[in-house]
Image (spheres, helix red, strand yellow):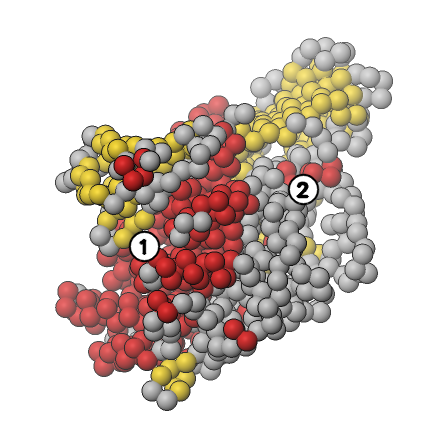
Amino acid sequence: MNPWIVVEKEWDPHRANYFETIFTVGNGRLGTRGSLEERHTGSLPGTFLAGVYDAFDAPVVDLVNAPDWLVTEVFADGTRLDTESAAVLRHHRELDLRRGVLTRETEFALPDGARFVLRTERFASMADRDLCCLRVRVTALDRAATVTIRTGIDGHRRNLERLPTYREDTEFGYDRKWDKWARSTHLRSTGTGFTDGVGMLECRTIDSGVDLAYALRTDLPTTPRRRVEARSHESIAVEVDFAVAAGETVGVDKFVGIATSRDPEATAAPEDRARATVARVTDFDQASAANAAAWDRLWAESDCEVVGNDRVTQALRFAVYHLLIAANPDDPTVSIGAKSLSGEGYRGHVFWDTEIMLLPFYLFTQPRAARALLGYRHHTLPGAREVAADNGATGGARFPWESADTGREECPQYTHDGSGRFYTREEELHVTADVAYAIMRYTEVTGDETYLFTEGAPILFETARYWVQRCEPEGDALVLRTVMGPDEFHSHVDNNAFTNRLVRWHLEQAAAVYRRMAAEQPELLAALTEPLALSAAEAEQWVDAARRIRVPVDPDCGVIEQFDGYFERTVVPITEWDDNDMPRYPAGFDHFNCEGTSLLKQPDVVMLMHLLPEEYSLETRRQNYLFYEARTLHKSSLSPSIHAIVGLRVGEAGTAERYFGRAAFVDLDDNQGNTGEGMHIASAAGTWQVATHGFGGFQATREGLRFAPALPSSWQRLRFSVHWHGRVVRVDLGHHDARFELIGDGPAETISVWGDPVRVWPGEVVEVRAPESVAS
């Protein structure tokens, strides 16, 4: 096994949607699913541009399925080379994780037995995020033939919409399941054409009014017999004919430049910028080399390798690859949806997953990307103010449970068939505290106090204001009624422990930042607070409110009650597990009828133990882990990784390895059966966290970096890098030794390794032996 390569070895239409997802190519600015260039029955192609949303013809806003830059058809003597018109003799595709390149080789046979090989290579450039490239090569193996290649841009795209209600046991095959969906139209063509050999397709999102421009350039390594430029009102294409001899290869190199009217800091019109993108490309090889060099730089800081277990290394690199193609460090107005840019699941909406699950990876490997992701919350702060006002607040800001381009609430109220009611939009308030947590975590890890005092502080202050209004007095205490915690099986609850504790922490941090700015940055503080009419007296009220919020006061007394009355809920034991050794719903239960039970969808109190481990003793964390782990069904892909990390920290290594396997292979093995709809990107980030924060024993605290590795027996070593205060620490961990190298100028860094302080100087490799208690 090559841990840098993910392979499709044969053509299976039943598995096609799965490979479309895992073979997504992208660069943070866009993602394109790994569909065959010529498409096929049951295919679900998609290109998604970060931040391009539209609500026309849909119940809530969608991440737009944008024009398809891949669409290509190849004909041999009039027969279309596709999986249905010709016989597939062999088929092989490889995703090169190191370079972000998807290659394909398919051998077709015509009805008379003549064989033709179609080879393609595609990538979305990391060196130029406005550029996509496709190389097409066709070889006639047996005889002379006429080969026609038609490649272009298809603007006739639609988003999936509400699925009609069918009988419970109704199933549709791969060739029909997407046909049963309705469609939403989000794009209106505004022009197509060719000028000096370069094609242009322009369109506009109907409701949000975003202009999109695609420029098409084709290079021909062999002179064709005929070249035709074709256009319709929603598409453009170049068609070329070749007279091919037996053994001869012909083809096309295709370059597509993409620009939109919402691109940050852009001054020229989208059409001009798209044209400029394809004009500056020398040739395919030059574009490929630039892309590879950009990926080399990314992997130098982001690689995570397990020596001795190539399968796990492949899973980790697969996770890192998809994380790298999901974030754009150059755009602080976009975030990452629950399916990244790999599918339409959750309509491309942004959840708390970004701040809690994804951000740690970017913090420690790509801090510019982390900064951009936090920039999205500042960019959408006006929308968060509207959400607070819509929910009765007279000031402050509350971030929505699901957000898109504006920061307003985009969470649907009902399931797609109208049978189930979602209360998350009204009650799952903790996302606001999660954003505050991310702000403070970013500042702690990077030391970037300029960010904290400019963009971070207004968010902290405005959201603190919201919490003070949302809390209700109960005697001398403050309570939070009618909320939903991370668990999500239980709505309309009072005093969810996770929410209350994070709100207390949030208010304390907001007050502390205000005090610091008053002492260190009084002029900047005045500039920030004057438009908000925020006074020092109000900031002091946050301290009082934090003190009064009801939270578990003495955690060492035992198990923390998840919310008021949780211990009185009916205990329903989990008695069945699936083929992945994960719990099944007990008979008669599903997502919508667990309210009266003690069953949990995903970690709640355990998530609190994960985020604030130093607030609770080891024994408290262990008791709560064991109590709630036995009640958790893990019906969210983020659940296994959190249980793995907390399990490792409380001494449950065997359980942790099982949960790590579930998280690491959720998409590679499609162990939930829905990878075809898009990546579980939170699980990808959780996989990286389990390896580094879990088995690597890595923690970043106010006191510095800590490492206490406890590797699985099948792993020989674990290698990764982390950014810390502007420098990089390269980490190489074994069972009984560890090596560290500090990259960057400046003084030595003191880190903790297996509980002992270690000084690491820039440019030197320091080796540490495990103490006897660990080595034995």
Residue 324 seen anywhere in this rendered image of the structure = no
Question: In which quadrant is the N terminus drawn?
Answer: top right
For residue 17, the mark is 2
Q: Looking at the picture, does residue 104 appear above or below residue 385? A: above
Question: In which quadrant is the C terminus drawn?
Answer: top left
Residue 757 seen anywhere in this rendered image of the structure = yes
Which amino acid is tagged 1?
Answer: Tyr
Residue 757 percent coordinates (x, y): 20, 43
The image quarter in which residue 425 lies: bottom right
SS of the residue at dot 2? helix
Q: Looking at the picture, does residue 286 appear above or below residue 398? A: above
Label 2 to label 1: alpha-carbon separation: 36 Å
Q: Foreground residue, 640 or 566?
A: 566
Q: Foreground residue, 464 or 388?
A: 464
Residue 286 percent coordinates (x, y): 45, 25
Position of 165 with respect to 247 (left or right) is right
Position of 455 with respect to 66 (left or right) is left
SS of the residue at dot 1? helix
Q: Foreground residue, 323 or 157?
A: 323
Q: Looking at the picture, does residue 230 appear above or below residue 584? A: above
Q: Bin the neighbour count of mark 2 within 10 Å (Cα to Cα): few under 14, some 14-19, many 20 and up.
A: many
Question: What residue is at 48 percent from the left and 77 percent from the top?
Answer: 564
Residue 229 percent coordinates (x, y): 66, 33
Mark 1 lies on residue: 442
Residue 374 percent coordinates (x, y): 37, 57
For residue 120, the mark is none
